[in-house]
Amino acid sequence: MPSFEYKLSVLKSGHCVNKERINLDMNLQPGLRLLSNICRIRGFASQVQAPLTSERYKVTRGNFAALNDKDLGYFESLLGKTRVLTEESDLEGHNTDWLHMVRGASKLLLKPKTTEEVSAILKYCNERKLAVCPQGGNTGLVGGSVPVFDEIVVCTSLMNNIISLDEWSGVMVCQAGCVLEALNDYLMERNFIMPLDLGAKGSCQIGGNVSTNAGGLRLLRYGSLHATVLGVEAVIPNGTVMDCLSLMKKDNTGYDLKHLFIGSEGTLGFVTKVAIQCPVKPKSVKLAFLGMDNFQSVLETFKRAKQDLGEILSSCEYIDRASITSVTDNLNVKNPIGDFPFYMLIEASGSNETHDEEKLNTFLEKIMSNGTVTDGTVASDSSQMLAIWALRERIAEGLLYDGYVYKYDISVPLTTFDDFVQDVWKQVGDDVVRVCGYGHLGDSNIHLNITSKTYDPKVTSKLEPFVYEWTSKKKGWRSRPSNAQLEENV
Ligand SMILES: Cc1cc2nc3c(=O)[nH]c(=O)nc-3n(C[C@H](O)[C@H](O)[C@H](O)COP(=O)(O)OP(=O)(O)OC[C@H]3O[C@@H](n4cnc5c(N)ncnc54)[C@H](O)[C@@H]3O)c2cc1C
């Protein structure tokens, strides 16, 4: 069973969005660029009925009020009947998380369209002491987007207007419910792109991205959302609208409060609008898929890529053999190069095709002639690139076919990536099907995955606190605290 964190601080603080939640200690997989793959995973996961979160984790409901007919009447007068949903069939998808790992029991789904409506909802709920769960695309992999008990789900899917794009500065302002892929498509037509890209882009929404401080495949090039989000409008629990919607890159007037909402997962307020700096669309994109015999070569290739590709380096992903075979064996996806202990995906994108190609070729010649890289292939047309990206992005899906997946999203010094995987192998021994690592080299972020045929508490007890202690020793960080820490906190 994945470890979890009950956000006691949220419940105690009294200045939150009355939100109760569980965060499962799971990996944030930057997988699955193709929406069809997302559907496949959903289909796979939906064969299993998610257990009720409250039963699975034995947590007690906070001292919140229960919904009554008067409350429903208020919400209907505010939003109209069609945006106040109480049928079980309407709520099912909003009560269950993307991985079908946890399930809440909300009886009410609200679909506001404006900041004013969000403000009125939160003000009412705060006064009535009704718990609320903000929800975007519900693609979060840590169980935070679904209610734990009967919280009212307030979903942003109808808050999907693009408000403005300044084509001089590249600053776009939009409502929180805009889907990431729709924003990127809109921008591409106008010669810009979104500064973030992740496998869930077809469903996740910018408000959810901001609230989780989502990373993804472009972080190496454009930085985290703390760098690219220029402004946020958010509603705090008493209904007050916080206007931190700055449109300028430089804003040095005192405290920069918008940063508090980036990554706070709805605990401080409800994000309603976002202003984001959008980069210009690259004119040329190329993708190299490389195989190497040892981990030292991965490090050397990364170093050389930064030196030789410089400003055109846009993604640098690391994948070990056990990760690749989860896709080739379990999903029958073809690996275009031979069998290697390590693979890398290097994307270069820039503004001048000839110049970019020359740089990439020089880099590849160097690393192949000195034996750092043993084999590789380069794609420049979009269908070839998608086929190669699938090898990286479908790992999350491939692993599900092993049985049960124990996921850890960890940042450790990149020189220790492979030692980490090997030490975890030694620790869990023959109790598992696979131990594998893949991730973003540029961010020092490894996705450590362990699979077993079925859920086995013995494996969990071997993994935890081992994984966390290993991480701490390397001065790294992990996405969630361990069960042991949770117990201490309680
Ligand atoms: C295939 C796949 C690949 C992924 N790849 C990555 C990746 O590369 N990097 C990464 O970081 N994540 C990744 N994720 C995780 C997930 O997609 C991101 O966390 C995403 O940002 C969540 O957005 P969402 O709209 O789905 O939010 P939800 O899942 O609906 O919500 C996530 C959290 O934010 C809160 N929230 C949502 N909207 C608001 C709002 N308007 N105001 C306040 N709080 C709000 C929710 O209460 C919840 O706590 C991936 C997920 C999948 C399924």
Image (spheres, rainbow, N blue to C red):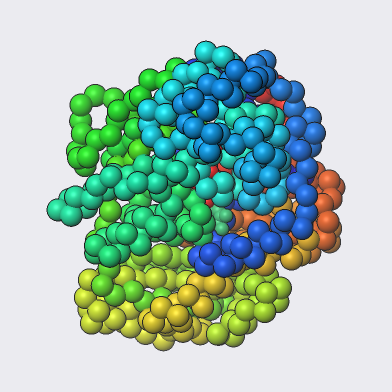
Left or right: 257 in relation to 460 = left
- The residue under the point 52% across, 28% down is 76
Number of callouts: 0
Looking at the rendering, in which quadrant would you find the C terminus?
top right
Taking depth in this image into account, of 185 and 454 the one nearest to the observer is 185
Taking depth in this image into account, of 311 and 264 the one nearest to the observer is 264
- Residue 226, image quadrant: top left
Q: Position of residue 187 (x, y in %)?
A: 29, 59
| Residue 192 visible in image | yes
- The residue under the point 31% across, 70% down is 349
Q: Position of residue 198 (x, y in %)?
A: 47, 57
Residue that sits furthest to the left in the current view = 168
Q: Position of residue 425 (x, y in %)?
A: 73, 59
Q: Is residue 433 above or below residue 144?
A: below
Left or right: 174 in relation to 271 = left
- Residue 308, image quadrant: bottom left
